Image (cartoon, rainbow, N blue to C red):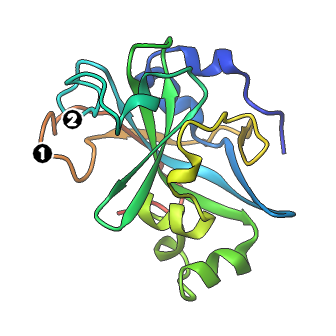
Amino acid sequence: MGRVLPLRFYRAAADEVAPALLGAILQVRHAETWLAGRIVEVEAYLRLDAACHASRGMTKRNASMFGLPGTAYVYQIHRSYCLNMVCAPKGIGEAVLIRAIEPLQGLDTMQNRRQGAKGRNLTGGPGRLCQALGIDLDFDAEDLRGPRIRVMSGAAPSHIQATPRIGISQNTEALLRFIDTDSRYLSR
């Protein structure tokens, strides 16, 4: 695996950071065990985007989204958690939602957490990947350089496609979902 992505990587706008995250390695540590997966699907959320949690200003729920670039923004929707990576300068309120990973390390642990799920049912979708990796609200505002969660450089995919985002009701036509078209772990 490569090197930990530096904070400067996240200082750009979310729509620039998002496609650059494809192929990067997300690692999460629990006790002495590291779980890891290659990022294959992301969505960008920009500050003036009506679908972005930050578009209406800072609240207790989304405060970490306005924090330092290179930190995690984790929120709960229904009974699932979603992991985002804060982008742009502090105070802007932009992030990249991690929608899917291809498991690389800790597969047995991930499958146990997901009741034996395999393929896209294991880590395809933001809630599934958070459950598989054990990510919850305790990870909110964590530095993405470790010690519990980190993002490492990886090999960029050969084929990237921009599509409309999934599961939103506003600004649905924006091409802000980026996928590795060769992956079988995409959410849909």
Q: Position of residue 11 (x, y in %)?
A: 56, 14
Which amino acid is tagged 2? Ala
- Position of 109 relative to 115 (above/below): above
Q: Position of residue 76 (x, y in %)?
A: 37, 55
Along the horizontal axis of the image, is 161 left or right of 119? left
> Can the viewer see residue 131?
yes
Q: Residue at x 67, y 36 (%)?
A: 144
Circle 2 residue: 51
**Residues at marks 1 and 2 touching, judged by CB atoms closer than 8 Å:** yes
- Residue at disc 1, secondary structure: loop
Residue 68's tag is none
Circle 1 residue: 169
- Residue at disc 2, secondary structure: loop
- Position of 117 relative to 6 (above/below): below
Distance from label 1 to label 2 (Cα)? 7 Å
- Position of 182 relative to 111 (above/below): above
